Amino acid sequence: MDDNFFRAAQQGTAPDLLPGAHGDAHAAQKYRQVTAKQQVDLNVKLICQFCRDPVPNLIEDFKQGDLICGNCGTVFKDRIIDTRSEWRTFSSDEGGDDPSRVGGAENRLLGPKLNLETSIGGGLHADKRELAKTHAKTSVVRSEKILLEGFRTITAMGERMGLNRKIIEAAKQYFKMAETGQPIKKIEATVAVALLLGCRKCGADRSLQEFASMINISKTEFGKVLSQVKNTLRQASQQQQQALSATAVAPVAGDDHDANPTTNNAGALARRFCNALNLPMPMVNSVVAVCDRAYTITEMASRNPRTIAGAAIYLVTHLYGQPVAAKTVASMVKVTENTVRQAYRIVRGNLEAALPEDLLKMDTSRLPAN
């Protein structure tokens, strides 16, 4: 410590604590002194206006919803809402030290109602068992059970596929609309369709074949369920528009449940396949460019997007001198090897239309004939 330090302390200014700051102008310039404005204490202290205790003894009474001073008993805040979970100790609990949580979180997808449920035990007599069976067959109870089971399946399947929360919530909306339109018999297939529509709504790159393989059904059967759900959603959307027009209420922008979201294109799918094959980013961009330009070829316009993506990957990897076998590409895009080679031959015969200018300058002699 030097004389300048004690002199600054006596004057009430911030002393320069940076070593060597007095002799080194560059170091002193870097040092930032604490200004008076920055020394203001911005902490908000809640104290009793009568006790003025700097260390207040405040007690929050959750039962009455009051904030009380523990020293003088002054109530200076009331009607405080307790946002904690509600716990109760029932008479059947042993010792009374194991409280049980009362009530669950409100599920907005089930509608504006209390989450209450009535159940009837089996009993020993036949009439009680029949009453329980009759109650279980009621439409309200069955509908709620299907919705809850569908929501659980959507969450589990979505997390298994690595889908984000936005897609899962959109899929739940589609599933609820499909269940409202008509009774759901194939819950797992309808869940997969709802996730597919949610992916398309949010712009995620997932194909129909992926969801069909996930639930182990054929692509044809999955397509039938998809058509049924789309028809149900279309009818529900029309009924909603009629109800809004009858009540003269304008629909909210961005809240329309489109029954036919945009489908995937080859370029969007190709990015995922390229990442799975660990291809470098320049090659990935070239594959996407070839996929986008392949739609201008007449023979490729009606092809499956997965086939176009496979042909583009097979072509671009050979063009860059890092070839990937057709069998590997076919296994990745979930089509046959012959299909990939057939689409590749079409693209190879139309290189000027399929390749951008930077790829046309590359050595096309690397491309195989088949």
Image (tube, rainbow, N blue to C red):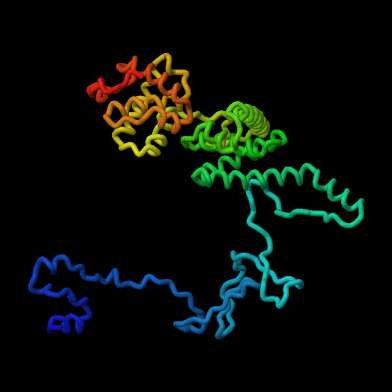
The answer to which quarter of the image holds residue 6 is: bottom left
**From where the camera sits, is residue 230 visible?**
no
In the picture, measured across the screen, residue 337 lies left or right of residue 6, that is right
In the picture, measured across the screen, residue 225 lies left or right of residue 264, that is right
Q: Nearer the viewer, residue 22 or 66?
A: 22
Q: Is residue 156 placed above or below 266 in the rendered structure?
A: below
Q: Residue 336: where, in percent of width, then height? A: 47, 25
**From where the camera sits, is residue 219 visible?**
yes
Q: Residue at x 44, y 82 (%)?
A: 54
Where does the N terminus fall, quadrant-wise? bottom left
In the picture, measured across the screen, residue 61 lies left or right of residue 321, that is right
Q: Residue at x 50, y 32 (%)?
A: 207
Count of labels in the image? 0
Name the residue at the left extreme: 23
Q: Residue 258: where, in percent of width, then height? A: 57, 31
Q: Is residue 59 placed above or below 234 in the rendered structure?
A: below
Q: Residue 120: where, in percent of width, then height? A: 82, 54
Q: Residue at x 68, y 49 (%)?
A: 112
Q: Nearer the viewer, residue 370 or 83?
A: 370
Where does the C terminus fall, quadrant-wise? top left
In the picture, measured across the screen, residue 266 lies left or right of residue 221, that is left
Q: Is residue 144 placed above or below 189 in the rendered structure?
A: below
Q: Residue 229: where, in percent of width, then height? A: 64, 31
Q: Is residue 346 placed above or below 180 in the rendered structure?
A: above
The answer to which quarter of the image holds residue 260 is: top right
Q: Residue at x 31, y 17 (%)?
A: 351
